[in-house]
Structure formats: C-alpha cells, structure tokens
Amino acid sequence: NAGVTQTPKFRVLKTGQSMTLLCAQDMNHEYMYWYRQDPGMGLRLIHYSVGEGTTAKGEVPDGYNVSRLKKQNFLLGLESAAPSQTSVYFCASRRGGSGAEQYFGPGTRLTVT
Amino acid sequence: AQKITQTQPGMFVQEKEAVTLDCTYDTSDQSYGLFWYKQPSSGEMIFLIYQGSYDEQNATEGRYSLNFQKARKSANLVISASQLGDSAMYFCAMREGGGLTSGTYKYIFGTGTRLKVLA
C-alpha cells in the first residue's frame, strides 16, 4: 500500500519549458489536491478535484492546469514555467467526510531558472 | 477573510517537557474543522489531530491534544512529554466551506511553527 506517490521528486526547468507532475493514490479517495509550499508561506491550494473528470481552482491557480482522467491520478501541468513557480509541490488525497484528514505525497521540488 | 495565524515562527522545548503551539483562525462559517500536521526535515506532511467546530470535547491523540477555545477562535496544539523526534515544522490548517457535499471543502494552512526539542 503506497499511499500517495508523486513523480518526479526533483526537476529543474528553464523558463518557458513545460512539464507535468503526476500524483497517484491507491486508497480509492474521491478528493485530490495540489498545493505549493514556499518559505514562510505555508501551503497554498492550487487546484483540487472532487472526483474523476472534475477539477476546480484553488487559491493560486494561475499558470497551472490539472486533469483527473482516472480516479487514482491527478496531474498538474505547467505550460510555460516561470521562476515564480519555483517551489515544493505537494499532492494530497482524502476520503469523504468532514473530519477526514488529507494524506500527502512526499513532494516534488521544482526549480525554474 | 478566512485565515489561519501561527504567530510563533520558532519554539524551543526541553525534552520531556510539554509545549503549546499557538493557532488562531478567522472564519464566518459555523461549520469548520481544524487540523494539525507535522512536517519533519524529511519533508513529508503527517496528520496529527482534528477538531470539528461542533465537537464539545477537546481532541486528543496520544501525546497530542488540541486546546479548542471557540469564543477566542484558537486551536492550540499541546504536545506532552516532548521527544527529540518531535523536532519539526508544525502547521495548523482549517477546513471550511462544504455546501451540500464535502467535496467543496477547502483547506487553509498557517505559515507554521518550527519546534526544536533540546536534549
């Protein structure tokens, strides 16, 4: 039982390049989230999904796109990377219920030069 | 605006002593939830404890307890008998919203408190 996994763990991009971060969970969770963590700012929600085929914007969605074609996978895309997108990206998932905690992946450290 | 505030950027505590990490929140929702997560230096986020806004008893999980004072809008984490392995970053988070389903819940995180346990 792997929980939540993220691919890749590290990546360096040049400004303007594109990439996709993959999040996978094996807990059959309906809800999935993408966050970014920057020093001194905690975690900020980028996009989230309430089920297969559905996505919604979070607090900081600009410059990112997401897709949830399969229940277990949630993809985060950067079409044209910018230095401001240098961050640590976390994926999380949870089951339904008001008290359900989020399970987090190990994070992806992205540097845009 | 909904907000989570953690005013202690860093804390020190002696091993085996108790420590309180502060968290205040601001929301206009009647129904909300408060979570604490631990982030060790390895980077993963570990769930510690949850308190619902309608829960009358303070939540406890082993050495962790949540001191919930609704009128003050505070949800402080108390760690009893600190251990060296408790050294980490601690985040307070609030679940708000919901509407008719739990799918529209959003989560807001504070900026964290870095705890160092001294031997």
Image (cartoon, rainbow, N blue to C red):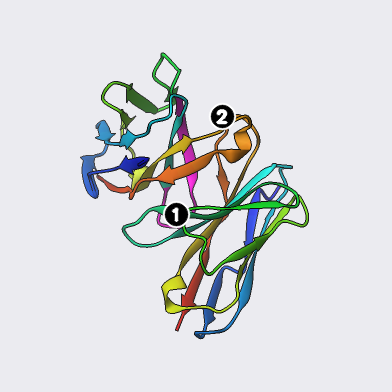
Which amino acid, mark 1?
A: Arg
The magenta segment is B39-52
Residue placed at 47% from the left, 25% from the top? B31
Q: Chain of mark 1?
A: A
Q: Is residue A5 above or below residue A108?
A: above
What is the number of the mark on residue A44? 1
Q: Which mark is residue A12?
A: none
At label 2, which amino acid type do we have? Ser
Residue in the picture at 26% in, 33% down:
B20
In whole angstroms, how far apart are the C-alphas of marks 2 and 1? 20 Å
Q: How many marks?
A: 2
Q: Is residue A82 magenta?
A: no
Horizontal placement of A58 versus A52: left or right? left
Q: x, y (%) of residue B86?
A: 36, 43
Q: Is residue B80 above or below residue A80?
A: above
Label 1: few (<14), some or many (≥20) within 10 Å?
Answer: many
Q: Residues within 10 Å of mark 2 (few under 14, many from 20)?
A: some
Outermost residue to the top: B56
* Mark closest to the chain's N terminus, 2 or 1: 1
Image quadrant in which the N terminus of chain B is located: top left
Q: Is residue B84 above or below residue B30?
A: below
Instruction: From the top left corner, tell me how far across and down residue A56 is, in percent.
Output: 61, 52
